[in-house]
Amino acid sequence: MEENFLNNRKRENHLEELKAALKAKKEQEGLQLKPNAQRFLQLLVDPKSCGIKGEDRYYGWNLHYYRDDKRTQALKEFFQKDILEQDQLDAMTYVFGKEYATYLHAYWKKIPSFPFNQSHDRRSFRATFTEEDEIKETIFINQCSFLLQAINSYNYDLRIEEFIEHSNAYPVSQFPITALLAGAILSGNTAIEDLLIDIVMGNHDTYKVSAPIIQGLLYSESPRGLEAVKKLLLAAQRQEGLRQTILEAVDQGPLSVFKEFIHLINREQMYRFASVVRAFDVWTGLDISAEKQSMIKQGFLLAEHFLEEPEQIAEGIQSKDNLEAYMALWACATENTGLELAAHLKHLAADPKAIKRLLALRIANELKVNSYYYLTSKDNLEDENETVRFYALKAFNVHHAEADDIQKDRFVNSCIEMVQRVPREGIMLQTKLFAWEERKVQADELVRSIINVLDLGDPEDCERIYPVYQQVDSDARYSIVNAILPFGVYYDPLKSDQIKREVLPHQRDFAFRFLQDKSMTLRESALKVLIAANVDFEELPVFIELLKGKSKGIKKLIHHFFFVVNPSFLLSTIKTLLAQKNAEQRLVGLDYLVALKGTDQFQGPIEGQVGIEEPKGTTYLQWVEATTNDFVVNRPKLTKTEQDAVTLLQSEANKMAEATYENGYGGIYDPTKVLLTNYPKDRRQVLEEIIAKYRIPLMTDSNTKYGYTQSIAKINAALADLAKRFEANAGYEYEV
C-alpha cells in the first residue's frame, strides 16, 4: 500500500524541470525570481549555467567534500556580497512553495546554533559568535548542503502530515524531514507541534515515532517537545536503539537542549547504558570504555558543572586532574569556539608543563580548525618531550599551507630527526593525559608529513628527503618513491592508452638510484620512469645487473625497453648477457635471441644498432644464427634450459610464428611424450555419476531452482523456528 501511494505522489524529473524553468526565467509558484535569487538557485542546482564547468558527479549535495571547488567558492563570494534574506526565501519559495519555504528558511537560520562539525567524527563544539573565517565558512557550507539535499531529494509531493507518516520509508527519508518539522514549529505551527508530541507520547493511533520526529522537537527548542522527548528517554528501558536515536539528536542540536539532557543523565544516573557511553565519546572525543563507569560519571558531572558555571573554566583548566582540565576546556569550546578559547589554547601551548601542552594539542585536534592547529603547534615543533613533539608535528602538518618558509624548514628538520629515532617496527607513545590512550608512531607517517611540506618538484628538496629514504622501512620508502617519481605504481608503460608524462632530469636521476631498492615493486616503479626517459648506452649495465634476479615484472619491463623503446641497444645487450657468468642473465640473452628470431620487425638487414659492427647487408636472422653458434662454442657445458633454447634457435627457419601441436606449440613440450586421455563415448553418463557422487542439485524443480541444498519446506520451518526464538528473547539486553 505504502509503495503504491508513494509512486502516485512521485515527482518525476523535478531537477531537470527546475533547471529548465530557471534557464527560461519562468514564473513558478506565482513568483518571478529577482536576479540574486535566480543566481543563488542556479549556483546550487545548475552551476554550468553560471559558467562553472565540471563533471556532474562533483555536484553532490554535501559541499564539505567539495569546499574548495569553483561552485562552493562562487557561492561563498556571492553570499558575502549580494544575497539578502528575502532572496534566500524567494529562492526556496520558487522550489518548495510558500509553506515549505517558510519552514525550511526558519531551519536555515537555526543552523548556526548547532555544532559546526557535522561529520562522523563530530564533537559538541559550537560557534554562535566567532571571528574564525574557517568556522564561518563551515557553518555556511552546512546551510548550503542542507538546502541542496532538500532540493535534490524533493521527490514526493506530500503534505507535511504525510511526510510524518512516511518518515521511516527510505525514499522519503532522503528529504530533510527534520528541517521541515523543526521549521514548522519555529514558524509557529502549533498543530504540527501537538501532533509530534502526541506521537512521541504514544497517543496517536497511526503514526509511529521516528528519528526526524524526535529531532524536529529538539532542534526547534520546543519546551513541551523537550519534556516529551525526556519522558521518552526515561521510558526507553531496554530499548537501546531508541535511547541512542534520542542522544544522537541531542549532540547535533542547540546548546540549551544539550545542557538539559546532560542534566537529565546526571539526575537519573544513566551512565550504565551503552548509548550514553557512546554519546559521551562522541561529544568529548574521549574513548572511555564502558567498564569505567566511575570515570563516565565524573565526566558528565564535570560537563554539567562547567557548562552551568563558565566562570569556573579558567580555574578548571589549571587543575592537576587531567579529566577536569580537559572537560573545562571542552566546555569552553562547546559554549562558543571563539576568542576566549583561543586565549586559553595559546596560554596552554606555552605552558612549561608537558601535560598542559598536550592538553592544548589534544583539544585542537578535536576542534579540527586550522588556526587552532597552528596556534598550538608552531612553538612545539622541537619540543623536548617526544609525545608533545609528535602531536605538534601532526597538528602543524594540517596547517602547513599558510606557514612561512622558516617554519616549514623547522618542521621538516624536526620530522627528519624524529624519523631517525623511530625503529622499523614503530614506537608506542602514551599521551599521559589519560591512562588508556596510546598511539603507535610509524616512520611512514612522519615521512608522509615531510612529503606534504616539501616541494618534490625541486631537486634540492628531493636531496633533503633522500637520506631518510635510505634508513626507513618499505612502506616509508614506497611513499618517498611515489612522491618523487612522476608515475604511480599503477602506471603501465606496456599499455598504449597510458598518458605520456614528462620526466624531469632530477626524477630520472632518482629513478636510477631507486633501481637499487630491495623492493621489486619500487624497482619496477623506477623502471617505468626510465622507460619514458632517455637512457644513454653507457647506462645499460644497470639494466644488465637487474636481470640477475628472477622477477618476471622486472624482466617484462626490460624486455619492453629493448624491443619497443630502444631497439637500437638490443644486439649489444644480447652479446653482453650471453657473456655473463650468471645463468639467469645468459638465459635472458637466449630468450631475446628467440624473440628476435620470431619478430617481423627484425627480419631484414641490421640497421642502427649501437655497439655492434657487422658487415653491410647482414640480416638479423644471420646474426642470430652466428651468435647462437658462438655461444655454443664458447660454452661447451650448457644447462638443460640453455640447451632447449639453443635447440629451438638452431631449428629450421623461424617456426615460432607457427606454433602447432606437432612442434609442441613452439617447443613448450615434447608431443611424443604426452599421453592422450581416452574419454568415454557417453559423456552424459560420466556427468551423471559426478552429480550423484557429490550430490549436486539439478535445479529442475521448485525445491532446488535456487540452488539450495535443502528443500524449501525444510528451510521455511527453520526460519519459523528462528523467528520464535527472536520474539522470545526480544527484551534481552546485553550488559557489560
Image: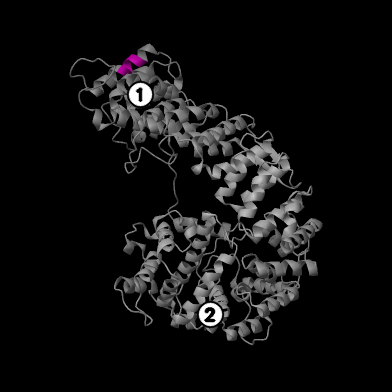
Q: Are marks 2 and 1 in contact (CB under 8 Å)?
A: no
Q: Using residue 128 as the reference point, say whether residue 493 is left or right of it.
A: left
Q: Which residue is more in the foreground, 679 or 730?
A: 730
Which stretch is magenta? 627-631
In magenta stretch: residue 628: yes
- Amino acid under disc 2: Phe
**191 vs 718: above or below:** below
Nearer-the-camera pick, 680 or 495: 495
Q: Secondary structure at mark 1?
A: helix
- Verify whether residue 288 appears in magenta: no
Q: Which residue is mark 2?
A: 163
Q: Dot 1 corresponds to which residue?
A: 647
Q: Residue 714, percent across and down? A: 64, 72
Location of residue 404 with respect to 158 vertically, above or below: above
- How far is disc 2 from disc 1 in space, using C-alphas? 82 Å
**Amino acid marked by disc 1:** Thr
